[in-house]
Every structure is written in structure tokens, then in C-alpha cells.
Amino acid sequence: MNPKNFFAELKRRNVYKVAIAYGVVAWLLMQIASQIFPFFEIPNWAVRLVVLLLVIGFPVALILAWAFELTPEGIKRADDVDLSKSITHKTSHKLLWITAVVAIVAAALFVGGRLNLFHSKPSTTTGVASDKSIAVLPFDNVSRDPDNAYFAEGIQDEILTRLAKIADLKVISRTSTQHFKSSPDNLPQIAKQLGAANILEGSVQKADEQVRVNVQLINARADSHLWAESYDRRLTDIFQVESEIAKKIADTLQAKLTGDEQHALSSRPTENSDAHQFYLKGRYHWNKRTEEGFKKAIEYFD
């Protein structure tokens, strides 16, 4: 077949428009899978299955568009259709309209996903903290060296940051919690003041290359322990500890996690332990909000 005639035949049989329509419909289905499935607690493997089936279906759709044609009598093989009686020009217009409508719906879902309209939000009642709300109080530095306070503060910050990436949790900001000590006597009162139903307390002990992190999750309303754990690890494993703590808290509070959130909780920002230590020291001095603190922070960040 002459290449020119071949491409003309592709156009006549609406193969190009089917490809565009398939791409738009596939995009819509992927938006539904990624935005709506988590809302109904459909597992993440189902999203991957939808994407895989859509990829496999693309060449199949093009082959069917080439081989078959829609006629007033139904679907027939394209080679059996009299060209003078072909209605592909009519079906072409309908296909364009359908594609436009689907594209608008897909775009709306895409925008909704970017604005987090489909994430389930913690249910709240006026004056009552959500069951999935949590405040991470400052961690105690129980190391022999008081200069290790930067490390305890850094661990608290990084656990809080990981928790804040979970849309199903309400996480109280560090700005609100930094004025309290790790184990306050009036815990229910502080929790009410912060608007949190749950409190995470912790302590950190650092000695050379070894780290011990103690944490306990407390239901502030009942003033009862939900979960407590101690982690004895090497300094290079501290990111894994932070990830395990955040995941355990999410499980205990029955927070729903998307695939992206699970990946974020498991992330390891750097493989360089020394760089991490300098970063924590820099942030510790930066948070003091003093001229001297800013100068030291810049030195450590450099």
C-alpha cells in the first residue's frame, strides 16, 4: 500500500481520533482510580491494575478501529463496507463531542485532586478534637551531653513532618507545641488547648554512633497509653526509626494512607549521616530566632 494512501485510510477509519479519544478516556479513568479509589479505601494495587489494563488496551483499540466500522446495520468489518455508504464522517463528529465532554470531566477530577477535594478529612465537631488529631511534644534530651539537645529536637521535627504528610491526620504545628515540655503534668488540659485528641511524647539518648529513642502515644481524653516503644539503633538508621514511628502512629489512629503517603513516610532524605547531623544542628540554631543563632545556623548549613 502506498504510504500516502495508508495514512489517508487511517484518517478515514477514524484511527487517529480513536487514539485521541482513548487517551482522553484513559486519563479520565486514571484520575478516577487515583483520586476516587483511596476515598473508598480501594487498595493501591487496583490503581496499578487499571493503569496496566489501559496501557494494554491502547493497541487493541487502534486495531479494532482499523478493522471494524460502525454502520446503520451495526458493527461490520471495514473491508466489507461500501465506501459510498460509509458513515465514518458522522461517527467522527460524535466521537469528537464525546472526547470533549470526557476531557472536561477528566480535567475537573485532575483539578480536584490537586486541591485535595477527594481526600477524606478528619471529622470534627465544634469544640471537640478529632480522634485522628495528634500533637508531637518536644522530645527530652536524656543524653549525658546537653549539647545533644539539637538531635532530640531534630527527631521530633522529622517525625512531625512525616505525620503532616498524611492527609487523614490532623497534626498540630511545631509552633504550637514547642512551648510545652515533653511530659506535662496537666496533659488533658494541654491537649484541649492544642485541639488534639492524642499526644506523642518522647525522649532521645545519643552516644557516639548509637541512638535510643523512646516514644509513647497517649489518648489525652482518657489519659491512657495507646502505644509505647523503645528503639535502639545505629545513628545511620535514624530515618528508619522515624519512619517506623510515623507508620505505627498512623496504624494506631487508623489513618488511611495513599501510595504516595506510604512512600513519603519511608523516604530517606540523604545517605550521608554527617550531612544530616550538620543539618539538624543548623535547624536547631535557626529555630532560636536570634542573630547569633542565625549565624551559627548558616555555618552548619554551609
Image: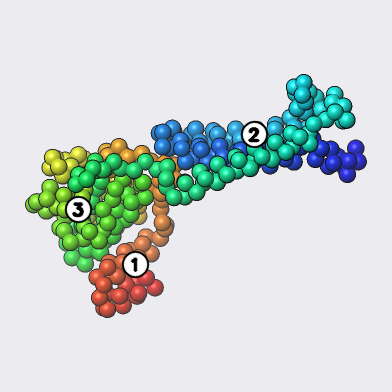
Question: Which residue is found at the position 85% from the left and 41% from the top?
Answer: 8
The C terminus lies in which quarter of the figure?
bottom left
- Callout 3: SS: helix
Question: Which residue is found at the position 41% from the left and 33% from the top?
Answer: 40
Callout 3 touching callout 1 (CB < 8 Å): no
- Residue 38 at what x, y percent from top left? 43, 37
Per the model, the C-alpha gap separating discs 2 and 1 is 49 Å
Tell me, for residue 38, which label it has, or none: none
Q: Is residue 260 left or right of residue 235?
A: right
Callout 3 touching callout 2 (CB < 8 Å): no
Residue type marked 1 = Phe
Question: Which residue is found at the position 42% from the left and 42% from the top?
Answer: 118
Residue under label 1, please give it. Answer: 278
Residue type marked 3 = Leu
- Which residue is more in the foreground, 103 or 10? 103
- Residue 163 at what x, y percent from top left? 32, 49
Per the model, the C-alpha gap separating discs 3 and 2 is 51 Å
Per the model, the C-alpha gap separating discs 3 and 1 is 31 Å
- Which residue is more in the foreground, 64 or 185? 64
Q: Is residue 229 visible?
A: no
Residue under label 3, please give it. Answer: 194
Toward which corner of the image does residue 179 lie, by quadrant?
bottom left
Earlier residue among tags 3 and 1: 3
Residue under label 2, please give it. Answer: 56
- Callout 2: SS: helix
Q: Is residue 257 left or right of residue 51?
A: left
Earlier residue among tags 2 and 1: 2
